[in-house]
Amino acid sequence: YLAFSGQKLILQLNKNPSRLKKQAEKKQKRYTTQSVTLQCNTVDSARPHRPSPKSEMLSQDDPKSRPMLELREKLQPEVIELIKQQRLNRMYEGTCFRKISARRRQDKFWYCRLSPNHKVLHYGDIEEFSQGQISPESLQEKVTVADIKAVVTGKDCPHMKEKGALKNKELLELAFSIHHNSDEYLNFIAPDKHEFCIWTDGLNAVLGKEMTSELTKSDMDTLVNMELKLRLLDLENIQIPDVPPPVPKEPSTYDFVYDFSQQHI
């Protein structure tokens, strides 16, 4: 078989040597290209993967990256204090609440506001619904913040423990009470969910407790994200290291400060 193939090759070479030469060059070129491609793939697979600068920048801007988490954690105390001041300022302006009578008539109102020094809650009945501020002098009753023992919400409120009130989900979501003195309660029905969060957060703030309402969580995320974007504006297209740079070594000598007491001639 080999002898026959050799004779066939010699005959083809004698008949058309140029054609056979072109076919050989074409096959050699194809085999060379495949060999180079195979070698490149082998080298790339053995080489450790390195992310491009663009992908590195995207990973650094990721909210879950280490630098972003550290910056977010640093900003949270400032944002919490800002939210706390907003809650206290809103309580200082005061809010008009509806009174729930035994007959479920909602035609009476009362007003409550926090004193400027955040130490006293002034409240009292009013004849009609008011959206403006009412002076503390016109409010007959008051509760000292130091006498407040706890703030309860929902079904734990005394005015929500009746059977009819427990069936009203809307009232349960807006109800909160202040437990003060020995066994006295100041009961509230907030006009809406926003005011409910404002007052429960504010009361917890003056008592030195954590603000845990849904509004606080939403405000926290919004303000922290805004502050992050503002602080990162000047760092656009600048690579942020994952770890802080090492502290340089101390100099071998500190005799590099010019001594003005010596006179040089």
Image (cartoon, rainbow, N blue to C red):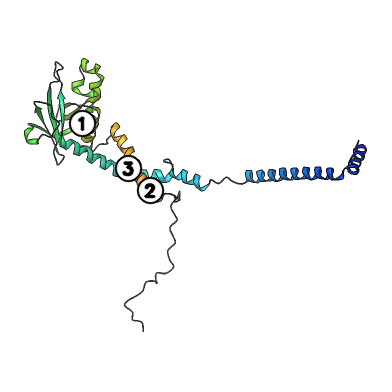
Circle 3: is it few (<14), some (14-19), or many (20+) Cα within 10 Å? Answer: some
Q: Which of the labelled discs sits on residue 233, or is there none?
A: 2
Q: Position of residue 92 (x, y in %)?
A: 16, 37
Amino acid marked by disc 2: Leu
Spatial CA span between label 3 and label 1: 26 Å
Judging depth in this view, the residue of 151 and 28 nearest the camera is 28
Residue at which label 1 appears: 150
- Foreground: disc 2 or disc 3: 2
Pinpoint residue 134: horizontal percent, then vertical percent. Answer: 10, 34
Can residue 166 be seen by looking at this rendering?
A: yes
Give the class, few, some or many, for how many residues have Cα within 10 Å of label 2's Cα (few <14, many ≥20). Answer: few
Query: Residue 228: image x %, image y %?
Result: 36, 44
Position of residue 154 measured from the top left corner of the image (x, y, whole percent)? 24, 24
Q: Is residue 202 left or right of residue 120?
A: right
Residue at 63% x, 43% y: name it.
Answer: 45
Residue that protrudes farthest toward the bottom in the picture: 265
In the image, what residue type sits under mark 3? Answer: Gln
> Amino acid type of disc 1?
Ala
Where, quadrant-wise, is the C terminus in this rendering?
bottom left
Q: Nearer the viewer, mark 2 or mark 1?
A: 2
Point out the tag, 2 or 3, that comes first from the N-terminus.
3
Gap in Å between the C-alphas at discs 2 and 1? Answer: 44 Å
Q: Give the residue at mark 3.
A: 76
Helix, strand or loop status at disc 1: strand
Return the residue nearer the eye: 240 or 53.
Answer: 53
* Mark closest to the chain's N terminus, 2 or 1: 1
The residue lying at 10 percent from left, 26 percent from top is 128
* Separation of marks 2 and 3 at Cα, in angstroms: 19 Å
